[in-house]
Amino acid sequence: MSASPLSTSVHTTGLSVRLAGRRIIVTGAASGIGRTTAALFAAEGAKVTLFDRNTGAVQKVAEEIAAGFCSVDITNEPDVARAVEKAASEMGGIDGLINAAGIMSKGLATEVPADDWRRIIEVNLTGTYIVARCCIPFLQLHEHSTIVNIASAQGLLPNAPGHTAYAASKGGVVNLTRALAAELAPKIRVNSIAPGMVDTPMADGYRANVGNYALKRLADPEEIARALLFLTSSESSYVTGAALAVDGGRSFH
């Protein structure tokens, strides 16, 4: 398996501070893509507030990058509403959201009970909706606000047996994104990215399954974070409603 061209640390050399003055919430920020994205965004000049239900881990990340944080379960709407209000107060507003929180599932449709299905949908799809819904009134107060939701290559092309619930939840995220993009235009741009497997703990047990990836490797978390940066920055000012595949060629290969 070939190596990623990036290291696992956020590169800060030669940054152009592309998010200077922005105020952004990142969910699922205690680990994985969320953590890397929060660090990159902070390095690019944004004020960042981290959301995660893992209190100890999210506090540690917040201290490392000098960010605010809230310990919150994204499926609990009253708690999310309070956390969003707190973030807006501390940052002086909100003009960006990254919905990175999510959980993985495995099992054939005949093996996954309805309660497990509901939990996957509740976190990956409903949780994304709740956070966006709570943030929208604040986002609407500012010009050029953005929402970027993390879907999955499974949501674009669910061809890996054993991930039915996960694929359904992430396909829902893709269409939730499109619906919000239509509803919130022209003031708020809403996009999604669809990663393939990423070198995070969520990929444990699947790391060898890259045979149908054109690039024959997992993504470095920073490669995903940089796609999120593009869709959050002014460089993507004419992009909304998109589902950007960042999957090493999995979706077409």
Image (cartoon, grey):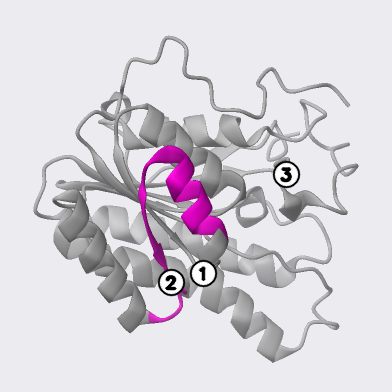
Q: Is residue 246 magenta?
A: no
Whichever of callouts 3 and 2 sits on the residue coming sooner in the sequence is 2
Would you place residue 182 above or below residue 33 in this image? below
Residues in magenta? 57-76
Q: CA distance from mark 3 to mark 1?
A: 23 Å
* Sequence-first disc among 2 and 1: 1
Q: Are marks 3 and 1 in contact (CB under 8 Å)?
A: no
Q: Where, quadrant-wise, is the C terminus in this rendering?
A: top right
- Cα distance, mark 2 to mark 1? 5 Å
Residue 131 figure quarter: bottom left
- Residue 53's label in the rendered image is 1
- Residue drawn at 30 percent across, 69 percent down: 83
The residue under label 3 is 197
On the image, the x and y values in percent for residue 211 come to: 88, 36
Dot 1: element: loop
Q: What amino acid is found at the position of numbered circle 2 in the picture?
A: Val
Q: Nearer the viewer, residue 124 or 221?
A: 221
Image position of 70 with respect to 214: above or below? below
According to the picture, the residue beneath numbered tag 2 turns out to be: 72
Residue 75 counted in the magenta span: yes
Q: Is residue 28 visible?
A: no
Residue appearing at x 70%, y 42% in the figure:
198
Would you say residue 76 is visible in this rendering?
yes
- In the rendered structure, which amino acid carries the disc numbered 1? Arg
